Amino acid sequence: MSESAVSIQNLRFRYRGLDELVLDGVNLEISEGEFLVIMGANEAGKSTLVSFLNGLIPHYMRGAWEGDIVVNGRNTRDFSVPELAEDVGIVFQDFEAQLFSTNVELEVAFGPENFAIEREEIKRRIEENLRFVGLEAFRKRSPVTLSGGQKQKLAIASVLAMEPNILVMDEATTDLDPISKMGIYEITNKLRKREDMTLVVVEHDTEEVLEADRIALIKDGKLAQVGPAQDILRDSDLLSKMGVMPLGIPRFFEAVGSEQLPLTPEEGAAVFERQNLAISQEKYADLVNRERTGSEEKEAEPIIRCRGLSHTYPNGVEALKGVNLDINQGEVVAIVGQNGSGKTTLAKHLNALLMPTEGSVEVFGAPTEEQGIFKIGQKVGYVFQNPDHQIFSEVVYEEVAFGPRLRDLSKEEVDQRVKDALRAVGLEGFEKEDPFSLTKSGRQRVAVASVLAIHPDVLILDEPTTGLDYRGQRSMMDMVMDLNDQGSTIIFITHHMWVVAEYAQRVYVVKDGQIILEGLTRDVFSQEEVLNDSSLRPPHFVHFSNLLGNTFLYPEEMLSCLEGK
């Protein structure tokens, strides 16, 4: 057993002004060279825990605490954040906030310069770390011109340039498309080969942590369980209880009574064949036919129509190029694509936040130029990707109640809508809080709740599940589907492909400002090569089913189509 890189003993902590403990008796040993993943629901204490590792707590963020954190033999009580930064580097969830230099090269050089490293050594570190993350060709570019995935890689390179032997990534891939996220985890896996590098990763996405050594599950500030990653990932009930999304493949095999619980698509296909399981093609055809019939019933005169839609920003960037799109009444439509593909630009045209440079957008039978944003906004609600572009009230209740009040609803109805919306996003009890005092994910939930409370005819959500844990994602999308059942048309942008698989009826895939693929969700997810070219990939379970020759969107579908079931 290698020596401990981090030793946490009896750690308890409460933030200043709060009564409840955020961390309650945490004991954890992290070995040198280990890849540890910390998982749990929102507000479980994950980010607070890792903030102790480099002294951000208690030196910058104050509160009452007891216990000891020893990093590389140094008790964090006795060393400042700059001193601990020599050992521990952190990449935060809001990684863009870490970037402030005028070009990529200067960003990487900033940390070593502050450590008074000699110029030649700084040059070496710049070269080595830009090459390591694949950004050599971008060294003179401004960080603001990079894609989300490239910015994330730059944040990692700037931390690695300080040569810490402990790297912490706090939900640092949350805002990235699937392929960009894979790119970050490829870097993580390369780092694992460095014997002197210890990795501590806070992550929500179970599909991304298969290579971890151990997983620590945290709930209500306590470590609920710590164990080998593959053992914990096979325990679907445990993950669900912890507010973490269970993997679809082991869930499926557990349901069929298999003793073997594979984790990857390839392992799953092999076990499926070995156990002589088979899909009833008659049942599968019936499933597909019901889906197509339901879609055809909704086809009528589109309530939103784009024809030849192009948009060029004032700086000359051509974000959309000849887009044709139809949204029908009552549909649930996902718009997907890599970071910077034009998804948000497209969505903003659907409620007149942007106007076409060329082509046309019609909403409820009239061009958006003729209606304007105020008129369209009464029927089309929009949730922004960045909550700070939307929130303006000083109290959560007032923020969520604003829209219903504009519609002259009774106080009782306003109260009920606020209550339902806050419950859906997991913010019950926060009615009197200042929304700007919440975390980024908390502010995102307030923004979503404020639009959900309106019950609009059309609801557009730009990355509504970003920053939410599995329960929060489920709760929000279930409420969105309730609105759909009541007649609302739903359009959402997301990087979470499982959300697309389980909730969307149709999908538009956007690449470089053009729609390159459109269709029913099942049909789109069956075309994996096109998706990969668009920096997308289906969920592991869907890929597993594609390997077997049929496309299933989630385990219950495949179970319903098994022979003899």
Image (cartoon, rainbow, N blue to C red):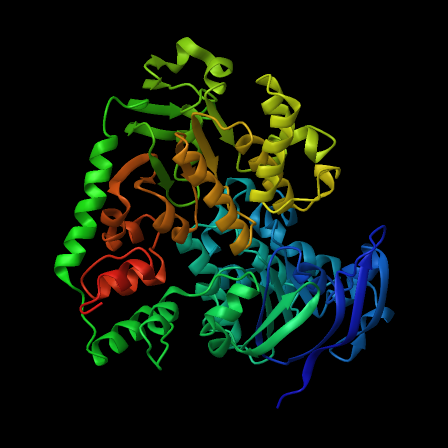
Picture coordinates of residue 84 (x, y %)? 76, 67
Please give the name of the residue rendered at 46% of the width and 39% of the height, measured from the top-left corner: 480
Q: Quadrant of residue 296?
A: top left
Residue 543 visible at all = yes
Task: Tell which residue pokes out farthest to the front in this image.
Answer: 412
What is the number of callouts on the image? 0
Whole-percent x, y for residue 129 in the image: 54, 62
Quarter of the image where the C terminus is located: bottom left
**Position in image of residue 171 (x %, y %):** 58, 57
* Picture quadrant of residue 419: top right
Left or right, 178 with respect to 46, comes to left
On the image, the x and y values in percent for residue 61 come to: 81, 55
Q: Which residue is drawn at 48% across and 55% down?
A: 135
Image side of residue 298 versus residue 450, left or right:
left
Judged from this view, the residue extending furthest toward the bottom is: 1
In the rendered view, tell whether residue 475 sits above or below residue 56: above
Q: Which of 495 and 60 is in front in this view?
A: 495
Residue placed most toward the observer, 477 or 412 = 412
Q: Residue furthest left?
A: 282
Image-based side of 423 in relation to 312, left or right: right
Q: Quick check: 497 above or below 232?
A: above
Image point 35% across, 29% down: which residue? 320
Foreground residue, 542 or 320? 542
The image quadrant where one finds the N terminus is bottom right
Give the vertical position of 392 relative to 293 (above or below).
above
Q: Can residue 535 be seen in this view?
A: no
